[in-house]
Amino acid sequence: MTHSVSHNLILHLNGNDLSIITVKKDGMVDNLQFYPSINLQNLSNVLTELPEIYSDMTLLVSKQNFITIPENFYEVEFSDLFKLNYNLADEDTIGLDKSDYGIGIVYALNKDIANLITTKFPRVKIRHEANVLLKKLFKEVNFKQPRILISINNDILILMAISDGNLILCNSYQTKTNDDIFYFVLLALEQLNFIPAETELVILGEPPSRTEIFELFKNYIREINIWMEELKVSDKIANTALLSNSFALQVLICE
């Protein structure tokens, strides 16, 4: 793997899977390596092979439980808030990904994995997928129009709702089928008193089964759109679906 200190490094910990992406100074994705079901020994070996210095280093955490908290709760005990919603495993630690928009994401992360990565790269910035998505929305989306925005990551659905200038909902759900996705979206519409005919559904990233999802929603939602970032990807990279499926990863690459 060719390397320059001007390259950016993105480690995408997607549940138990790890992707390593290097991005050149001009925004070109220059290398992508994928390691399914990574364990501590494999991760240690992988990190040993990586150079020590990059221009910028980010660990993107996906498929990990999270809650949103207002910034006036940043100084409280995060684990107590987190445990109101989820069980915290003995091997996990709590992290906080702050935003510039008055809210943050509190999330769980395997402490041994985090220690390995931060020991190798002390300057690494740890970002949770949900906060990457929220930051993008706050910067570029008109919050006045009712919208449901969803990110589909295998069996995890992140669903966000905005209307009247406010973020109303940001939550994750476990899903096994497209019917589950359909159920949670319609449930959000009902609970938030959104009118389906006046609501836009925005799919963040390329869903694994675009046609089936559009078929499910087309008779219920006024407008359905897919939001993807335009990436520059080297011709030598074959597994580009890892990039197109994850909108949060696309955002980090294009920052």
Image (cartoon, helix red, strand yellow):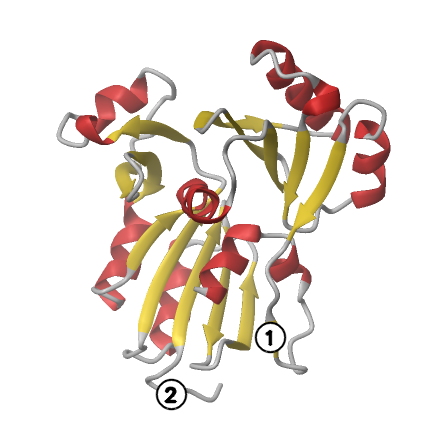
Task: Pinpoint residue 210: horizontal percent, then vertical percent.
Answer: 79, 44
Q: Which residue is mark 2?
A: 4
Asked if residue 250 lies left or right of residue 225, the reply is: left
* Distance from the alpha carbon under mark 2 to that under mark 1: 18 Å
Q: Residues within 10 Å of mark 2 (few under 14, many from 20)?
A: some
Vertical relation: 238 (above or below) 194:
below
Q: Nearer the viewer, residue 44 or 1?
A: 1
Asked if residue 52 lies left or right of residue 29, the reply is: left
Mark 1 residue type: Lys
Tell me the quarter of the picture where residue 190 sits: top right
Tell me the quarter of the picture where residue 129 sits: top left
Q: Residues within 10 Å of mark 1 (few under 14, many from 20)?
A: some
Q: Residue at x 69, y 51 (%)?
A: 206
Vertical relation: 22 (above or below) 127:
below
Judged from the image, the secondary structure of the residue bearing numbered disc 2 is loop
Vertical relation: 203 (above or below) 250:
above
Asked if residue 138 lies left or right of residue 203, the reply is: left
Task: Pinpoint residue 173: horizontal percent, then vertical percent.
Answer: 56, 26
Q: Which residue is mark 1?
A: 232
**Nearest-to-viewer mark from 2 and 1:** 1
Q: Residue at x 59, y 35 (%)?
A: 149
Mark 2 residue type: Ser
Task: Pinpoint residue 179: horizontal percent, then vertical percent.
Answer: 76, 25
Asked if residue 152 lies left or right of residue 11, the reply is: right
Which corner quadrant holds the C terminus? bottom left
Q: Residue at x 37, y 57 (%)?
A: 59
Task: Pinpoint residue 66: horizontal percent, then vertical percent.
Answer: 39, 32
Q: Residue at x 29, y 58 (%)?
A: 125
Judged from the image, the secondary structure of the residue bearing numbered disc 1 is strand
Vertical relation: 104 (above or below) 246:
above
